[in-house]
Amino acid sequence: ISRSAAAWLIAANAAGALISGLAFASVRPPVDPVRRLRLITIGFACGYAPLLAAPGLGASIPLALISGFGLSPLLATAFVLVDRVAPAGTTTEAFGWIITAFSVGSAVGSAVGGAIAGGPGFRVAMTVAVGSAVLAAALISPPR
């Protein structure tokens, strides 16, 4: 996959996030938010895994669209969960910490992913990304 394809892959991923966000906003699943967050995180990882086998840009664009489906539900569920567990009067600060963690994680992930993609290659970078999402799903636990 060429460097010039990155914008198309990001656009497809964002379109997937938009589609899933609109769909997720219209559904109120009965699953408790901790379990839902774990399931969505696993789905998020599974959505990115097929990109490991994509032979080229033609196959990668629809896969990038699919991989974006997990992003909006993941973020929405994380915010719902934090709203439920944050002590009274600290919800705004707790949301600020989520946004900070997301921004720092995105920056670090981009730096590490870029270094890996520039060295060992795209497939290794995607393997690290998918593995990180699986690890995150394993670390999700009910609030105390």
Image: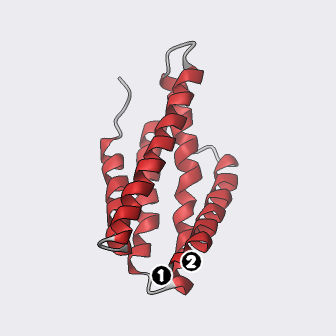
- Reading the image, the residue beneath label 1 is 1
Q: Which residue is at 46% across, 65% downward? A: 47
Q: Which residue is at 70% across, 54% downward? A: 22
- The quadrant in which residue 83 appears is top right
Q: Which residue is at 37% across, 32% downward? A: 142
Residue 102 position within the rendered picture, expressed as x and y whole percent measured from the top left: 49, 42
Residue 24 at least partly seen: yes
Instruction: Estimate the spatial distance between the alpha carbons at disc 1 and disc 2, rounded to whole Å.
Output: 7 Å
Q: Is residue 102 above or below residue 17?
A: above
* Numbered badge on residue 42: none
Proximity of marks 1 and 2: CB atoms separated by less than 8 Å: yes
Q: Seen from this angle, which residue lies furthest top? A: 89
Q: Is residue 61 above or below residue 27?
A: below
- Reading the image, the residue beneath label 2 is 5
Q: Which residue is at 44% across, 74% downward? A: 51
Task: Give the class, few, some or many, for how many residues have Cα within 10 Å of label 1's Cα (few <14, many ≥20).
Answer: few
